Amino acid sequence: MSLVYTLLSKKNGISAEFLRSRVDRYQNIDTETFQRYFARDKGELERLGIPIETIQREDTNGRNTTFYRILPEKYRLDEIEFSAPEAAAIAMAASYWGEDALGNAAQRALARLGVESTELEHSVFEPRVSSSEPAFGQLLEAITEHFAVTFTYANPVGEQSVRVLEPWGLGQRFGHWYVTGWDLDRQAQRIFRLSRILNEVKRAANEFTHERPSDFSMREALNRMKLDTGTSSASIELREGRGISLRTRAEEIVESEEGWDRLTVRFDNVEDMAKDVAALGNAARVLEPASLKRAASSLVERALEAHRTAVPTYELRKPKKSAGRIPETVKVARALDMVSYIHDHGGATFAELSEHFDLDRRTLQSELERLSLCGLPGGLHDELLDVIIVGDDVNILNAEHLNHKVRLNLAEAFSLMVALELMSAVPGVGDDSVVESARSKIEAATGHFSNLSNAITARFVASEDPERWSQLYDAIEDHRVTRLKYISGGRDALTERVIWPVRLKEQTGRIYLQAWCTSANAPRVFRMDRVRSLTVLDEHFADDAAELAKVPTDLYSPLANADDVVVKFGARLRPLLPEFTPTKVSTKQSDGSVIAEISSAGDQALRDLVTSHAGHFEVVAPPEKRREIKEWLEDASKMHAESGNQPS
């Protein structure tokens, strides 16, 4: 805060030597440590949207010296006026983000723009978008700052290679995030799915050689990707009575007297098909194509490798609402917003500040005390922020350099622009022109990010084919009883259900139907990819608020009286943790993962999670359950190895 205050107050700039002699954190440290600290602080402020300029000029002793400054016109957020419908659209779009980093950024942006946040209402369709991929932040930064990156990448069948990319754009389609740009090894434009990036994305030493073309559009790049329907065919053998999900999709089933049936199944995507096969363990083996064999085998091997490693040390505790230490950058952003908020309102009460910044009184008191210590480094009393508290009223004087709102940083701008683009295609969103005008105003306020709107895009899976879901939308709105033929994953069986459909939800590329199941006389959540037929009946159900209120909002459905299991969520799966309603969690592991205790949804559900998230979802305890999963994976590995040796 003091660094921002100082660099804003001196238009001619401040030398590093002055800062080193006056700022407490820089005093009494060697030159190398100072340079590291100062470079880190500058980087953190720039990530907050606060640009620091360097200028070269002579100092008072005639020496050519580097000076640093923040220009007020590049610090301040231009005033934007939103109509009531535009503000409502922005607030609703921001609520599409979950409680991850971009969700928090979206809420900070709303507060700065003077838009009241809102909860996602119970409507026909409730989508959620997440930036859970670990590579996300570094790639977004690389796109805006124009630097090359390197990473290890696995293709759809698990083959790995090291890639060097000059990224141009980032977008979501088919439920996955993609990055595209110039591949230096291939010397061509290429597109990569973030979930296939296996390690940390690092800045490459290569110079940026191919700037983003002026006519580039990430939206058009993703539009060229086609999600073909049933274009490939697989020959798969299943143990008798197993794999009902594949059997109900098969074009042909040839029964065998040896306990195996041979199926011919058409599929869209090799990775999704491989997950279906891998989840069946040693009850399924692929005969052809070879690409599907390798993909299914790769999932099993990666899951097995994770379960062969030593169990990490952990200590489980009851989860807290805000676990972990709040980063200093978040505190700084909030403090800057607090100063401008108090200035704009001519003062504020503790109650107003607590509600606006979601702080309890004790934390708010602490942050106001810290503000009173900010100002010119080593400054006198009248050079520090004058925080005045009289009873319940708060005011801040001597803060003229900080009274203006800070412009949106990269994460804040990205979160709002992507959310509004997603909103424009959501069924029943209303007036598209309102969404478009709101997005145009946000775009105008973020022009410092080099035409960011062309570099980003996103769409929900449900918006790809709205006609497919129109029958269900109508059934939900009209309270029509609906009959499903549904694959029960836990029982590996085709069941028939009569339901009262309540809402559709989309999360991480998968669509769910929340409903009251009259067959079970209980609330249920159905995965739509497991629905084999759907019939909307002429019968209407009453809008029974008491019963419909019982319909769960969580998408993970543990069994009644289920045993607890301890599982490890890899770093990229951490945003999904709240959906599993953990009873206990560990402190974050060194690799960014979290270990949590959850209620089991059954053995098959665990196996599905273990193989589909190969290596990123791991059963930790009880020991016998981990051993059982490991042995199951070993049997599956042998089966796929034997299948791989057979002629295709």
Image (cartoon, rainbow, N blue to C red):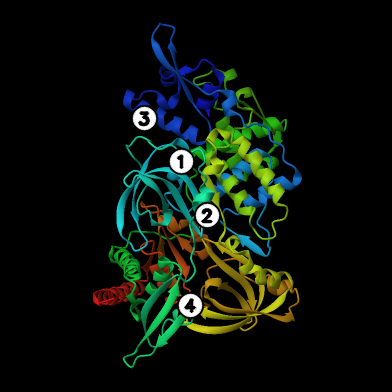
Query: In this rendering, does residue 646 appear at all?
Result: yes
* Relative horizontal placement of residue 328, taking residue 381 as reference (left or right): left
Packing grade of label 3 (10 A; few <14, some 14-19, many >=20) is: few
The residue singled out by tag 2 in the image is: 223
Q: In which quarter of the image is residue 538?
A: bottom right
User: Quick check: marks 4 and 1 in contact, CB under 8 Å?
Assistant: no
User: Quick check: marks 4 and 3 in contact, CB under 8 Å?
Assistant: no
Q: What residue type is labelled 3?
A: Arg
Q: For mark 3, give the secondary structure.
A: helix
In the displayed structure, 608 sits above or below 376; it is: below
Q: Which of marks 2 and 4 is in front?
A: 2
The residue singled out by tag 3 in the image is: 36
Q: What residue type is labelled 4?
A: Gly
x%, y% of residue 556? 52, 68
Packing grade of label 1 (10 A; few <14, some 14-19, many >=20) is: many
* Relative horizontal placement of residue 343, taking residue 529 as reference (left or right): right
Compare residues 241 and 41 and report the one nearer the observer: 241
Residue at 31 percent of width and 75 percent of height? 636
Q: For mark 2, give the secondary structure.
A: helix
The residue singled out by tag 1 in the image is: 143
Q: What residue type is labelled 2?
A: Asn
The residue singled out by tag 4 in the image is: 489
